[in-house]
Each structure stands twice: as C-alpha cells, then as structure tokens.
Image (cartoon, coloured by chain):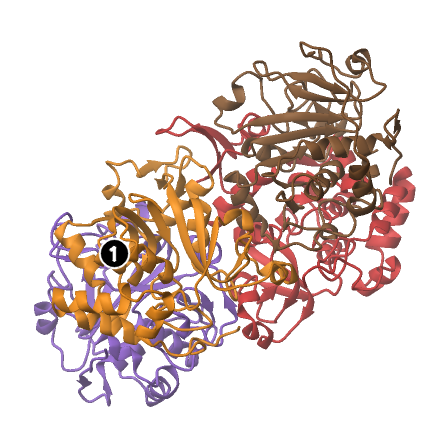
Chain colours: A purple, B brown, C orange, D red
Amino acid sequence: MSGAAAAVPGYGCTIDELMVVTFSRAMANDTRAFNGAVSFIPVCGYRLARRTHAPELVWAASSIAVDADPAVVGSSTLSDELWGGASMLANSPFDFWTYAQGARYNTFAFRGAQMDAYGNVNNSVIGPYDSPKVRLPGGGGMADLGCMIPRIYLWSSTHDPRTFVDRLHFRSGIGWGDGGDHRASLGMPGGPQLCITNLCVFDFEQESKRMRLASLHPGVSVDDVQAATGFEVLLPGDEVPTTAQPSTEELHILRTEVDPTGARLREF
Amino acid sequence: MSGAAAAVPGYGCTIDELMVVTFSRAMANDTRAFNGAVSFIPVCGYRLARRTHAPELVWAASSIAVDADPAVVGSSTLSDELWGGASMLANSPFDFWTYAQGARYNTFAFRGAQMDAYGNVNNSVIGPYDSPKVRLPGGGGMADLGCMIPRIYLWSSTHDPRTFVDRLHFRSGIGWGDGGDHRASLGMPGGPQLCITNLCVFDFEQESKRMRLASLHPGVSVDDVQAATGFEVLLPGDEVPTTAQPSTEELHILRTEVDPTGARLREF
Amino acid sequence: MPDGATVALGGLSMNSAPMAFVRELVRANKRDLTVVAIVAGMCVDWLVAAGCASRVVAGLVSFEGFGLAPNFRHATQSGKVAMEEYSEHLLICRLQAQARQLPFMPTVAGLGTDVPALHEASGALRIETDAATGRPYVACTPLAVDVAVVHVHEADVAGNARVNPKLIWMDSEIVNAAERTIVTAERIVDTGSFTAEPHRTSYPRFMVDAVCEAPRGAYPTSCFPEYGHDGRFFEDYLGACGSPADFANFFERRVAGPTTWGDFLAANDPQPVGDGGEVGS
Amino acid sequence: MPDGATVALGGLSMNSAPMAFVRELVRANKRDLTVVAIVAGMCVDWLVAAGCASRVVAGLVSFEGFGLAPNFRHATQSGKVAMEEYSEHLLICRLQAQARQLPFMPTVAGLGTDVPALHEASGALRIETDAATGRPYVACTPLAVDVAVVHVHEADVAGNARVNPKLIWMDSEIVNAAERTIVTAERIVDTGSFTAEPHRTSYPRFMVDAVCEAPRGAYPTSCFPEYGHDGRFFEDYLGACGSPADFANFFERRVAGPTTWGDFLAANDPQPVGDGGEVGS
C-alpha cells in the first residue's frame, strides 16, 4: 500500500522526511495533540518533536492512547497498533470528547480531499452533493474538532489543483471559515496555523486568513506552487525562504526510532 | 445511632419490619431500582423482594453497585459498605445519570423532612428560605430523579403533622407536582405510587393525585392518621383495609439475611 | 430484527465492529435497514453489498489507508443507498439526546461547515443562538434506534458484558440510545466473573436484551487487545472489486457463503488470536 | 489558592473527600472561599467551622445517618455563610457546560420544583421551552471553578492519577470544569505503574497541575476499597457540638491543631487501613 517519495535536492532526505521534520519543528513543548485516521505525517511529527525539542508534548494516539510510544507506526493511525507504552487509554465519549470540547487538547491536524485558501476542508463529496462524482468517506471528526481545537495544522502529500481548490464542493471541516474574523465570530478558538505540503509550507495572512507562502521546499519555485494551487497564492513581503533543512539527528531519529518501517510513505 | 420501633399488635413483628415487608411486596419483578442516602427501609425492601417474589429485581446500591448483595446493611446507604457481591460498579456521571435520564432505572424511593399530599418533598429548609429556622441538607438528587424515574415510592418513619404538611416550605423534589395532570404536562413519566409510613399506607387518587389511605397498620384508626397528617386525608370508597401481615418466611429472611444487624432501625 | 429497522453498529473504523452479527444480517437477507454507524467501514460495506441497507447514518465510512469502502461508495453515488451524513460528534450528540430523553443536546460541532444545513429540512439539527450570550450552537435532536449491536470480550447469560481492558470506543452511546441491545461476545462466562471484578463491567444486564457467543466475532476488524484487523482481508476485498462478477464471487466465497461462523473463519484463515496489539492488557 | 477563590472538592457524602487538603486550607486560614461540592459533608463543615468559606455551592451537605452538618447548618441559618443550592444533576450540568465550553447544558432535572427559581435572578439556571417539541427544560449555564481538589489512590510526579478500582463518584466533572486541578494521592508511584495498566488511569497528566502525597488523605471519609469512613469521628464531632467552647476545643485538638497530617492521624487513631469495604478490588 505504500508509495515512494521524491528526494529533496541537496537535503539528503526525501520529501516525506522533510514534511515530518517541518511539522515536528512547528510543535511547541506545550502541544497537547491527538490524531485521527490516515495521519502518518502528523503522527511521525509528534513523535519526532517529543524526541527532540518538545519532551513534554502530549500525543494521544488515535485520540485514545495518551503518551503512547509504540515501537513502530503500523498500517492504520486509528487503531490499537499505535497504543504501546501509553500511560492512559482514554474513553472516547467521556474523556476524549470532553477534553476536546474544553480545548484541553490544543492541537489537531487534518487533511482533506479538497482544501481551500482559508484552510477549510472537504472530505465528503466530489461533485454535486446529491449526485456526487465521488462519495468520499465523510468528515468524521473534522466538523467537530475544527470548531474546538485552537491550533490546527493542515498537510497534503498531493499538492495539486484538484486538492487545493478555490471553492470546496462541500465544507466538511472549518479552518478560518470565510476568512477575516469569521471564525472568531462563531466563538471558536485559534485557527489554522500552517499547511505543510509536498511542495511548500503555507502560513495564513493575519487579516484575510488566506494561505500565504511561508517557505518553498528545495527545487520548487513560486510558479510551481501557483500552478499546483487552484486559488491565488499570497506571497510574503520579503523573498520566500527555503524550507529549513532537517538535521542529521532529526533524520536519524525519524528513520530509526519514530518510523523505522516507513509507514509515513502510505501517504505517498 | 439506632432507635427502636414499636411492636405491631398481633403481627409478631415490629413496625420497621411491617414497613419493609409492605415496601417489598410493592416491588414487581421488573423493578430496576437504586437508592440514595439514609434509605434503610427501601434498601431492605429491595433486598427482601429479590429473595422472595421478585428474583429478577435490579438494585444498584448507592446508585453504583448493580445487583449488590452485601452480607449486612451498614451505617450508611450511600457508601461502599453496601457494594459486596455487585456485578457492576457503575460510574456516576456517565453510567448512572444516563440510565436515570433514560428511565433505564424505573424505581426510586425518597423521603423528605416535609411531604405534601401530592408526594412532593422538602429536604432544604424549615421556615422562610432566606432565613430558615432549620437549614436541612438539601434535596441532593430528589429534584432530578423525581423528574426522571416513573415509579416513585415515598416512606416515612415519623408520620406526624410536622412531616406531612399541607404546604411545603420548599419543594426540593417533585412527586405529582400540583396534582392532576401537572406532572404529565411537564413531560415526566409516571409518578408516586405509594407512601408507606409508620401508621399506614397511602396510594394516590387517580384524578387529583392526592394521597389516599390505602391501608391502616394494625391498631391505627383513620382518625389517628388524620390527626397525624397536616392535610386532609382522602379515604377509599370502601372500608379501609388493614395492612397485610408479613409472612413468617418474609420476617425470617429479613431478620437473618436481609438485615441481620437491624440497620433499618437507624430510621427510628 | 425486522426489515426496515434502524440498527446501530458498534466499533470504530477498523476496530471492534460486530462483524459476526452483520454477517448473519447478510445471510438472513434483511432489507431496507437504516444503519447507524458513527465511524465505520467494512460492516457498512457488507450490508450495502448484500442489499440489506437502504440508508446509512454515519460520520465516516472508509477502509482508512486501504481505500474507500467500495460498495458504500458506488451505492451512495448512484443513489441506491442514501447517506445521511453527520460529523462524529453531531451524531454522538443526537444519540445522547435520545439516551437522556432530552429535547436536544447542544454542541458547537459543525458550526461554520456545510453539515448542519444537510439536516435543516428534517429538523434533525438546528442552529440556534443562546439567549444570554448570543453564542451560536447546534441543537442535536434525539435519534431513535431500534437495535444496537455491539461486540464485547465477555458476557454472561444474564446480559452483563465486559469490553477488555476497558470500554474505549463509542459503543456505549448507541447502547444507551437504543430500544434494545444485542451483544456478541468472544466468550460466555459465569456471572462470577463479573462479581469478581465489578468495576470492569461495561454494560449491566438490564441494558442488554440478548447475548450471542461469537469467538473472533469482530473479524476482519480488530478486537483489542486480543487480535488486530486483518489487512489481508481488506486488500483481498478491494482487489476483488475489479468487476461485479469477481466481487460477487469473492463475497459469496469469503463472506456470505460459509454456513457457520467457524466456516467463515476457516474460509478466511485469520492469523491466530494474540497477534493484535499487546498493550496494557 | 488565593483568598476568594472558587474551589471544588471531590468525593461524595461520606466517601473520598480530599480531607488532608481541606485541613491544610483550614490551617492556612484561607478566607472567603466559594466551596463547590456536589454532595458533601465533613469537608464543607470543616471549612465553615474554620471561617474559610463564605459561600457553599452544593446539592446536599449532611453527615447522613449521623445527623446534620452542624457548622454548615448554623452558619447558613444565621446568614454568615451563603448556601447556593442546586440539585445534584443541575450542578453536574453546570459543571459539564463549563467543561465542554457550551453556553448551557439542558436537563429536565429540577422542573416542577422550587430549585430553578432560586437561580433565575442570577441567570445561572433558566427554564426554557424547546422550539420544536414544546418541551420544557432547564438550561444550566457554565460554572467557573478556579481549583478542583480530588483524592486518588495513586499518582505519579507528572500528574497521571488513578482511582482504584475505578473512578466512581463525580470527581471527573469538577476536574474537567476547573481551571487547575490539585490531586492528593494515597501513594506516589512510578509512571511505569500507569503504562503497565493504561486503561485504569483516571486523569491524564495534562489535566493535573499538582500532586501531593497524602496517605489516608480522605480520613475520616472513606477511600474505597482501602478504608471505610470512621463513624466514631463523626460521632465525636457531633458530640462536641454541645457548646462553642467544647467544639472549639475539639476542633483544635482533633482537626486544626496537629502540625502534620501524621500528627492529625495520630490524634484521631483511625483503624488500620484495610477495614473498609473489600469489594471487588
């Protein structure tokens, strides 16, 4: 089921590794995170962050297994395969959903089959809702957790115009909503922080809350990103930096401890 | 802390025993009950019923310990002393309150420092609410469970005009409310079935939902009951029967298995 | 379980679905079922494949990293089966409103998304504004469920039931909401097993209406901590979807055809019990 | 814990109250505390006796069969301490609304009683009518809690905490609602104790801000299954209430005076640990 990821020119690593390390570096020490289905990049990112700069980071595997430290990442990120070493197996309706509603967990990452400039996501249908071209799985907890969790991260291993669209066919989960103060006006905390793709890293422009290019992966140009993106990509005032290089130590820990079997490649 | 209860003339038992047996006989085999604090008569009644005519009866000791069968009844009916032999220790906020709200438990018994003709109870204050003569413990779960549970039973070991009053100083828990269809109009299931006292048994007249004399304990007259009751006691069309005599078997089981240490006398 | 019933299935995604019971629904050729499954996969796909389900009420249906649930996908795309889509928490809240006999359960889940509008016409969800604070919320109305089916590790004949080592997924929400509950159990045990460790009981006997023994009854989903999901089954299942004839053959041979549950397991040759996660059990 | 704080105490009636911590509040001479306790007894009476509490937010305060809580009774009758009275479930719903960041939690609890009207002026409770069904409900608004204090059996230094054999009372509701949580524990254990049995953890480290070791820390209330409540203490306490001087003497000698928790236990000579209920542990 696993694919292969391209090498990152000059960085001595592949694109999956660059994405995991970039995600990891965005995690502060006070991160309290959990993960849903098919979330290999974030899962590896949390695990790497805890082994490097964020030792206090909380990660609840599958939203259940607090402080889990499994030997390997398996074929599903929503299963007991990830629960080894946990200090608590939380109950879903009472523990997890209470902690989520109370923002005791402060970090969640999601990806959608479609994502728009405001970090909203669609995982429900491609095409008209009532007669869809593709019936996708459904948003699961996206519509819930997007509303409840203050620090939202997005990622995609398929940065192309089918994924990054100007208008979602359905909004399964909210990011910054309609932009500006829309999200805050609904009483929701925080909002999307970054979107990490196989081409670049976006942050969100402070006023409009639209995706803005924060860094380009080596070998990728602004034009490449714009061509792969169905909405107009905002640029920072200064020159766009290159995504920072993973350290030898980060790559070593990722390859030998965090994900020795390369489960993260299931996203490629 | 225990008192003594009077003998019942001609019945070969004391009044606490008559009350427990009468309570027990009111319990059908499909009873699913639990108990709160200082509820020795109902606790003994559930235990006796299960050992006689209602083997399938469910009783959750302290609302926690489902199907408990402790060797003795201790000094508190809201403590782990009662939990021996249980098949489940339920969690209070998630298990118990969900079962109560869904009327999965169908039977609850309460007593108040004051009770009125409609089976409403006061356990909050004697006197004006803001400057009470006596600050009572508070209603605890009465205001909740009175609304949720369809089969409500009341009891009192102190049948006197201070307890059975025309007007409560505060309504801590609802029985039939203002009477008539008031309770049903609030969307609540069932309502009070019986009130078992040290003098008599009341049921509730079908239209008005006021207490009506159902039976007199031996040696007690209608006038005795009226004199001990602060509201007008309704009488049945026919002559008031005498409360049925406990069987030798019931008394034996009560004395030797259900409550061998006489914890029920703490209510006297 | 009459045709047309609303049946809620336990488990979550690749985990702990009552597959043995679902297979019996397939074999009994049930029709017009409304299937409630908060986060589901194979259990829904079997019922859709066999034509048992006319409506799916769910937050998510997929095979996760293995792919989309193929029969669910095609039947909902063609309109043959209706998808009543919620988010996970909106569905939980509807079940909780039912269980607690409340007019609705409030939540902020779903605000700012397109999900609540799907249920405006039916009135199942309403966006309202709190009178005191002006804050918006979604009022989730009760969802009636005829029968819940959940898989557990141990049950006694009275209906006491236990999930090992702990009730983790959202099965309690469907049990609490349902009119009746059917439990399938890896093992039938004596009641003494429950009185010995009463704090571990997941459902008391009065919440359970029927118990069926079904060893490895969650296969091919997992039953933590005793066995994991069988990825090979998921791959074979998806691999057979190339043509309707191939799939019909696969479904008959590997799912619906075997007479007993034991025959079914033999046809699928699961790995020995004990190959699942071995965490904290 | 500043003077004037809102502190919620765990336990229920005669069971599992964080008495060692409450005694420290007494000894620290805290003032003007608002004490939230769903169903309570001795813990509230100590804080009232010592003049620490100015307001009690509760569903019930008593010593059960032993009698009324004497200091609570007299202080609330005289108006010295305010009683903000709820029912048990109305208070739980206010805590749940806070924990879940909802504008309110609905319940039918309290309808038809005099309890909701006590809170009409403050707006803490509102009787409302469901738009779709016309059914009345009580909207329970969030109750902010500064600090929750709960007693557990085992905790590690990171804050993971476990109640044996299972979290039973409503402590989780105050922990989930509180800004900060302090745990007192019978024993401090290694984190390995939690990773060995992660399904038994009651609170994860991120919900707990401080941990204090307090062996027999619930005395004179119970700590199931390790020890029962000490009825003799309750009787002695009530017996000393004949005169203010007698009580002051008793309270100094048996409660507030002993310097350490060990001194306190020695002054009260509890029965050996293990005399409590021995059920299912």
Q: Is residue D31 left or right of residue D130?
A: right
Q: How far across and down, in percent of the image, does residue B240 sit?
A: 74, 14
Q: Pick the quarter of the image with the N terminus of chain D.
A: bottom right
Dot 1 corresponds to which residue? A138
Quarter of the image for residue B238 reads top right
> Residue at 68% of width from left, 16% of height from top?
B212
- Disc 1 residue type? Gly
> Residue at 45% of width from left, 39% of height from top?
D104
- Whether residue D151 is visible here, answered yes or no, is yes
- Whether residue D70 is visible here, answered yes or no, is no
Q: Is residue A190 above or below residue D245?
A: below
Label 1: which secondary element: loop
Q: Pick the quarter of the image with the C terminus of chain D.
A: bottom right
Crowd around label 1: few <14 · some 14–19 · many ≥20 (10 Å): many
Q: How far across and down, in percent of the image, does residue A134 sit?
A: 14, 58
Q: How far across and down, in percent of the image, does residue D210 sit?
A: 61, 64
